[in-house]
Structures are given as structure tokens and as C-alpha cells.
Amino acid sequence: MILTAHQPLYLPWLGLFHKIYLAESFCLFDIAQYQNKDFNNRNKIKSSSGDLLLSVPVESQDHFNKKICDIRIVPGAWIRKHLKSIKLSYQKAPYFDSLYEKLEKTLYKNHKFLVDLDFELLQIFLKELGLVPSIVKASDFDFVGQKSELVLDMCLKLKASAYIFGSHGKDYADQESFRAQGIDLYFQDYQHPRYNQLHGEFSSHLSVVDLLFNEGPNSLNIILENNIQRINESVLK
């Protein structure tokens, strides 16, 4: 079984969906320590005045000592502001109406925990892209270790035969320990595509909503463009 994992992200970027496409199973790694100014609670869209960062406010007390699954959202006007920004930015996009209604319905559920919001949004985007991976949450297991050891323990307990790291995985993965357990590795090197956008010059590394609003049913093909589309022996380490 080919496994990949990632921390929960708010309105994720395209590269995450490429990793999920390549894998047979995806682990939402919600037991990682929350990081300030990471993308767990924020991401960028493209407005008429340029890239716009949307951030979900979270409780700050002891948040550096908490796992992402324990991070609570601060209720308030942020939902209305996010939806207003999305609407103003994309209401003229060809595939606006259907996706916007789903985002609006989800955000107005007033989730208490960030992971629940991120996970529900992720499921919407996967469905829009036609992706149906097996999904588990790390918080439902008892993975142990740090960094490379933690990933290896996850692979063993989930019975993975291969694991897909992101591009930074080479910086900390103990590749020999994976090989010793019969687990092959692939390190993603995502090549970001260009596609039709509103508001002038192309902007890269935005939320997947930018692609979905502009390209609709062609979005998955664009995500895969100029990237590996199948894990086989020739690309495994």
C-alpha cells in the first residue's frame, strides 16, 4: 500500500492533491505540533489587488505546546470576511456558484476545532477533483517517535509498502531505516502548473479554490500536468 500524509491545511495548495493522487491511502497528520504562521489555519487566494492571505483566528494560549487536533477556532466575524473576500475575488469565475455554496455552507457550521474545519474542506476539494483515497487520522492511532522515526512508525502501523514524502523529506528522513523495514520512498518534486486566472498576471502557489473556480472539471488534469502520475519501481528510493 502506498501511503502519504500531511498536516491539516486551510484551503490547501495544489501540491497536496498531487501527493494524494499518487497514494492509495492518506493520513491526516493532525498530531503534529501547531506552528505559528504555517498553513494550518491560513492560505492565499487571488484578489483584484493581488494575493490575499486568509487566516482563521485560533486560540493562542499555550498553542505552541498543543497538537493541531487540539487547536480551537476563535469565533467571530472572520467567516463572513473570508466568504466576502472569496466572493469578490471569484464571482466572475466560470465555475464560481457551485463551489462557493459548498464553502459557505461548511464555514457557517462554526466548527470548534481547526482540524474539523480543515478536514471537511479537504473532503469537498477531493470530491470536486474526483479523488477518493482511503483516509485516516493520525490522532486515531498511537504513533510514536520524532521526525523520521515517527513517520516510520506510522508506515509500519498502517502497513505501508511505500511512502511519499514532500520535497523537504530528504532533509530529515533516515532512508536506511525505511529500507531496513522494506518500505520504499518517493520524494515529491512538484512542478506547479499555469492555468487560466482572473485579475491579470499569473500568480502561483495559491489555494486550490483558485484553480477550481477558474478551471472546474479540468482542475485535476492541470494539477497533474508535467508531474509524475504513477508510483513505480523506477522512481522509488
Image: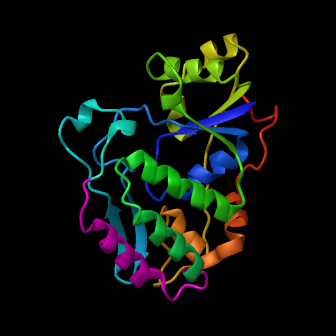
Q: Nearer the viewer, residue 69 or 235?
A: 69
Give the residue at x 38% y 54%.
111
Left/right placement of residue 213 relative to residue 107 reads right
Residue 93 included in the magenta stretch of the image: yes
Give the residue at x 76% y 30%.
1
Q: Nearer the viewer, residue 50 or 216?
A: 216
Q: Nearer the viewer, residue 51 or 146?
A: 146
The main secondary structure of the magenta stretch is helix
Residue 13 included in the magenta stretch of the image: no
Q: Is residue 74 visible?
A: yes
Q: Position of residue 147 (x, y in %)?
A: 46, 23
Image quarter where the C terminus lies is top right
Residue at the bottom extreme?
A: 92
Residue at the top extreme?
A: 180
Q: Quadrant of residue 108?
A: bottom left
Residue at the right extreme?
A: 233
Q: Position of residue 52 (x, y in %)?
A: 35, 70
The span picked out in magenta is 74-96
Give the residue at x 20% y 44%.
60
Q: Establish if 230 lies above or below 55.
A: above
